[in-house]
Amino acid sequence: MFQAVTNIISGMPPVAPPKDVEPFTMADAEAAYAGRVYKFSGGVLTLASGADKNAAVILEESADAATPGAKVRGSWITPGTVFKTKITNKNGTALTNLHASFKVGATVNINDTGDGADGETNSAAVNGPLTVLRMDAAKEEVWVVFNTCAVALDCDTTSG
């Protein structure tokens, strides 16, 4: 689960959007889960994972897949917003072995379930959408920023 904790640009804690913000439309037959990362595809939300550089929204509520085009509230991923999330295996299961390249300053991927950071994959070999700012390996928690997202495409921290 991605949870906004602060913004390194403004220095302010996040403010939840009001209830009357226009909700986002989910892709047909796709479940929505609060705290997961989603991207736009054809004007509707679908799960973001791996090296998706166009992640757009963290959902604030859930909806089942049985409701085609369900409307759900979410928060835009904006530059500088720091998120706390869990470190997992690539497939989203509990972490079994943290890769040695997963450390502060590394660019890492979103796990396959969109609800945490992939701590299993060699981050030196990927140019992932997340940058690690702080981590607690014992608790399997990490603080990250999106170095690229739908409102700031391909603004990653690597060159070439």
Image (cartoon, helix red, strand yellow):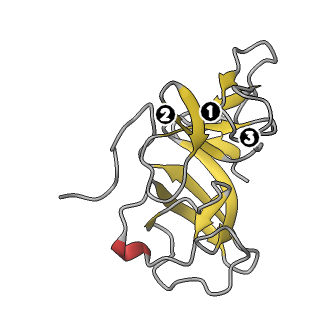
- Identify the residue position indicated by label 1 in the image: 27
**Residue depicted at 62% across the width and 87% down the height:** 97
The label on residue 41 is 2
**Quarter of the rendering containing residue 142:** bottom right
Query: Distance from label 1 to label 3 (Cα)?
Result: 9 Å
Q: Position of residue 126 (x, y in %)?
A: 37, 68
Residue type, numbered disc 2: Ser
Q: Quadrant location of the N terminus?
A: bottom right
In the figure, 149 relative to 105: above or below? above
In this view of the protein, can residue 72 be seen by the observer? Answer: no
Secondary-structure class at tag 2: strand
Report if the CB atoms under discs 2 and 1 are less than 8 Å apart: yes
Query: Distance from label 3 to label 2 (Cα)?
Result: 14 Å
**Residue depicted at 69% across the width and 38% down the height:** 29
- Mark 1 or 3: the one toward you: 1
Give the class, few, some or many, for how many residues have Cα within 10 Å of label 2's Cα (few <14, many ≥20): few
- Identify the residue position indicated by label 3 in the image: 32
Query: Distance from label 2 to label 1 (Cα)?
Result: 8 Å
Q: Position of residue 116 (x, y in %)?
A: 65, 60
Residue type, numbered disc 3: Ala
First along the sequence among labels 1 and 3: 1
